[in-house]
Image (spheres, helix red, strand yellow):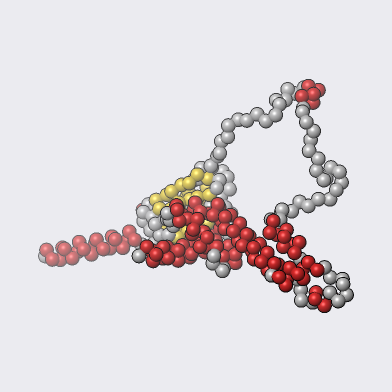
Amino acid sequence: MLKINSLLIIFVFFSFQEILSQSIEIFGKVQSESGVENIHVINKTAQVFTITDKAGAFKINVALNDSLVFSSVQHKLKEVVISNHTMSTKILLVKLDEHINELDEVVVGKVLTGDLLKDIANVEGNPPINFYDVGIPGYTGRIATQSERRLSEAGAFRPEMLLGLLGGGVPLNPILNGISGRTKMLKNRVRIERKEVLMHTIKARLSKDFFASNPLDEALRMDFFYFCADDENFVKYCKNRTDFEILIFLRHKYKQYVENVETEND
C-alpha cells in the first residue's frame, strides 16, 4: 500500500511539472494612448519574441511564470509574469504608460509683449537667406560623404573608354582611376562606410530590446555588432527590413558569437 501511495505521489508530481512547463500560444493586445504598432514583445524565459500589429495585437508562445517584456521608444519598459489566469484564458491585455521626456523650461530670445510695434523694435539680427529666397535651385537630398564625393569625382570606368581615347572625346580621369585601381578602392570604402552606418543605426535602435532577452557583457556588445556586420549577408538581411526580421538575424548571429567566445575562453 505504501509503495502504491509513493508511486501515486511521484506520478502527480511529474504531471504537475509537465503542466508548469507546458507551452501554449496566447493572444495579446497592448493598450496605450500613443501608438501601439511595432512594440517589441519578448519572452525572456523562452527566448522568443514578436512585435505588435497596427491594432496592438500579438501572438506568442508562453508557459506558466514566463516573463514577458514590452518595450518601445515611446513607452516605459514593462514586464509581465504569465499567471494561471492567462494560461486558462489564453488572453493577455497589457496597458503601457507613455514615456515622456520632460525638459526644463527654456526661454529662447526675447519675450514677446503682445505689442507689435515694441516687439518689432526689440528684434535683433537679420533672418537667414536660403537659395529659395533668391530663386536659385538647390539640392535638398542626403549630403554625400567624403568617400562618396571622391568616388563621384573619380568617374565610372568602362573598357570601351579606351577606344574613345583615339578620338580625344573621353575624359582621362575615369580611365586613369580605373586602371590604377583607385575607383575600385573608393567603391569598397563607400561600401564599408554604408555598412557601418547601418550597423550603428541598428545598434542604437534595437540593442536595448535585443540584449534584454539575449544577455551579453557590456564590454562585448560593440564587438558583437561588428561580428554581425562582417557577415556577407548583413546588408541583405538588415537593410530596409522590419525590426522583427533584423532581430531574427541578430539572434542567429548571437548564437554563433556566444559559441566563439566560449571556445576562446576554453
Q: Nearer the viewer, residue 158 or 21?
A: 158
Instruction: Identify which residue is drawn at 16% across, 63% down.
Output: 6
Which quadrant of the rendered structure holds the C terminus?
bottom left
Q: Point out residue 74 in the picture as x, y percentages from the top left corner.
A: 55, 45
Q: Please identify the quarter of the rendering in which residue 163 is found.
A: bottom right
Residue 117 visible in image: yes
Left or right of 242, for residue 210:
left
Instruction: Identify which residue is drawn at 59% across, 58% down.
Output: 196
Left or right of 10, for residue 81:
right
Left or right of 28, for residue 173:
right
Considering only vertical position in the picture, is 137 above or below 174? Answer: above
Q: Point out residue 247 in the picture as x, y percentages from the top left corner.
A: 52, 60
Spot the residue most to the left.
1
Residue 245 visible in image: no
Instruction: Identify which residue is drawn at 51% across, 59% down.
Output: 225
Considering only vertical position in the picture, is 13 above or below 161? Answer: above
Q: Nearer the viewer, residue 70 or 16?
A: 70
Which quadrant of the rendered structure holds the N terminus?
bottom left
Q: Point out residue 48 in the picture as x, y percentages from the top left corner.
A: 45, 60
